[in-house]
Image (cartoon, rainbow, N blue to C red):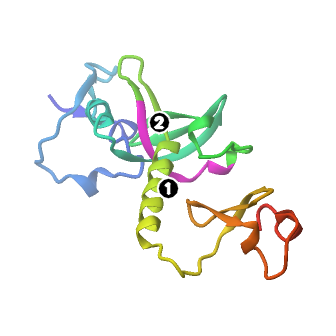
Amino acid sequence: SDGIIPSNEFSTDPEEKPADVFKQGDEIEVEVVKVNDGDMNVVLSRRRVQEKAFWDELTKEMNNNTIFEGLCKEVVKGGVIADINGIRAFIPASHLSLHYVENLSEYVGQTLGLRIIEVDKNRKRLVASRKLVLQEEAEEKRKQLWTSLEPGMVVPGIVRRIADFGAFVDIGGIDGLLHVTDLAWHRVKHPSDVLSIGQ
């Protein structure tokens, strides 16, 4: 019996067209949605087969620390929703960035690197984190910086904290101490006299 795949049931990717993927005679896996749509047609879905396969892959890859790409679609209560291969993933606000995010809508339309932190196949619930990916990237950057640093190097830095004995300066993921005696040629009473946070 011939079956029909409606356009919205063809793929998890709405941009994908049948002619770009298949040629006549190709064998494909589909799921029967309806045996009779009222016009004696069998209604089929390729998208549902893709989704099921992807849920299985998510469950497996979650333990392998795989990074997925997700397109941020909308802001919801407590976070945002991203599309990962046609599946809605919830990203809690606390997992969007390394720092507090005031305006979540600035992420809408962005493609984010995500780590899956919770998969509930039965409830079709997926929770992801961008923060974990950013932490790993920052850690890798720190390791590279540690191996490249040498005495005598001149590097840019940002003042993060000021204490009585000096200032803590971020030089690219590593905080270094700039002692009060090394702040200037002349005597400095307090680091805040010559430096400010964010400088």
Residue at position x 41%, y 23% from top? 124
Quadrant of residue 35 within the rendered picture: top left
Q: Name the quadrant of the N terminus.
A: top left
Magenta region, residue range: 106-117
How packed mark 1 is, by other alpha carbons closer than 10 Å (few <14, some 14-19, many 20 or more), is some
How packed mark 2 is, by other alpha carbons closer than 10 Å (few <14, some 14-19, many 20 or more), is many
- 195 above or below 133? below
Q: Name the residue carrying label 2.
A: 128
- Name the kind of residue labelled 2 in the image: Ala
Residue at position x 37%, y 47% from top? 67
Q: Nearer the viewer, residue 185 or 146?
A: 185
Q: Name the residue carrying label 1.
A: 138
Q: Nearer the viewer, residue 188 or 154?
A: 188
* Residue 173 image point, x, y percent: 56, 60
Name the side, left or right, on which 114 lies relative to 108: left
Q: Nearer the viewer, residue 8 or 165?
A: 165
- 161 above or below 91? below
Please indicate, yes or no, whether residue 80 appears anywhere in the rendered image: no
**Label 2: element kind:** strand
- Name the kind of residue labelled 1 in the image: Ala
Whether 114 is among the magenta residues is yes
* Residue 59 image point, x, y percent: 30, 30
Q: Nearer the viewer, mark 1 or mark 2?
A: 1
* Residue 101 image point, x, y percent: 69, 44
